[in-house]
Image (cartoon, rainbow, N blue to C red):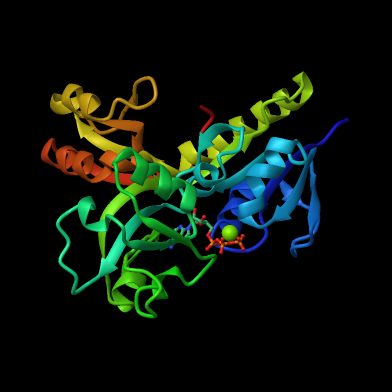
Amino acid sequence: MEKLRIAIQKSGRLSEKSLELLKEAGITLNNGSRKLRSVARFFPLEVIYLRDDDIPQYVEDGVAHIGIVGENEFAEKGCDVELIERLGYSRCRLSIAVPKAEVYNGLEDLQNKRIATSYPVILEKYLAEHGIRADVHVLSGSVELAPSIGIAEAIFDIVSSGSTLISNGLKEVETIMQSEAVVIANRNLDGEQKSLVADLLFRIRSVMAASNNKYILLNAPNENLEQIIKVIPGMKSPTVMPLAGEGWSSVHSVLSEKTFWSVIDRLKELGAQGILVIPIEKMIV
Ligand code: ATP
Ligand code: MG
């Protein structure tokens, strides 16, 4: 049987989470340690480990059928591949920053300035759209040093907490794009490859849904049962079972992480007791 070939980052900010996601999706890799490639057990999949910069091109060329890469690299490389899933980890943004002491009133201030970046394509496109002409200076790393060593007046780089900017005396002035890990796919997969991709995505989505949801059990006073059910609708509707003690029911449901705390507060107001919240390992969506 043919194997699906997936490219993931060899080492860096994407690799650990990507391997963990595959593991949670039930894909055990033959060698724990990073080689250049490894073969999965129980699923026809082969992993190849690459620098993240190379992943979009390898997927476009079909050397890898799919790949996990930062949306920023996907946008920068402009390869003809399809974005098939957002994975929600390795979130960051791409921003323009200038020295902290600099007065900044807007993009116009960047007119004819030198901007250092590892993402010239994304930056040039944005500047062109906004009618700014700047001198884009491409650096492959340590971009945040550029203003202090006098090779640029501004930088355009990845920001997550912003602490790197602060420690280099810079301030973020424009956010140009948000990024997260994404799955990209070659556009010319055959039927069998597409069906393997669908199987893998199904597993990945089940893992993601599970981590975004919790199983909740509680005891509800019957007089507020209807209102409590409205607060926790669950996947279809909650399971309700009578308790041995009169006037109370046990309610089981699924809660989204996003609304979690506000729902818990509302449940307490409605007299719910003995609330248990349990992680879900897999959720078949
Ligand atoms: P490679 O050696 O593979 O080229 P790299 O140094 O280019 O690695 P990393 O720093 O490992 O890349 O970052 C990989 C991806 O992780 C980035 O393209 C971005 O999408 C995301 N990322 C980068 N920095 C952060 C951060 N601080 N927080 C979260 N995600 C980040
Ligand atoms: Mg890289």
- Residue 247 vs 208, above or below: the answer is above
Q: Position of residue 248 (x, y in %)?
A: 22, 31
Front residue of 268/240: it is 268
Q: Quadrant of residue 207?
A: top right
Q: How many marks?
A: 0
Front residue of 261/160: it is 160
Q: Position of residue 72 (x, y in %)?
A: 48, 48
One can see residue 69 in this view: yes
As drawn, which residue projects farthest toward the right? Answer: 1
Q: Position of residue 13 (x, y in %)?
A: 53, 61
Q: Position of residue 159 (x, y in %)?
A: 37, 60
Q: Quadrant of residue 41?
A: top right
Front residue of 33/149: it is 149
Residue visible at 19% across and 70% down?
A: 102
One can see residue 179 in this view: no
- Residue 218 vs 115, above or below: the answer is above
- Left or right for 136, reference 55: left
Residue visible at 33% across and 77% down?
A: 168
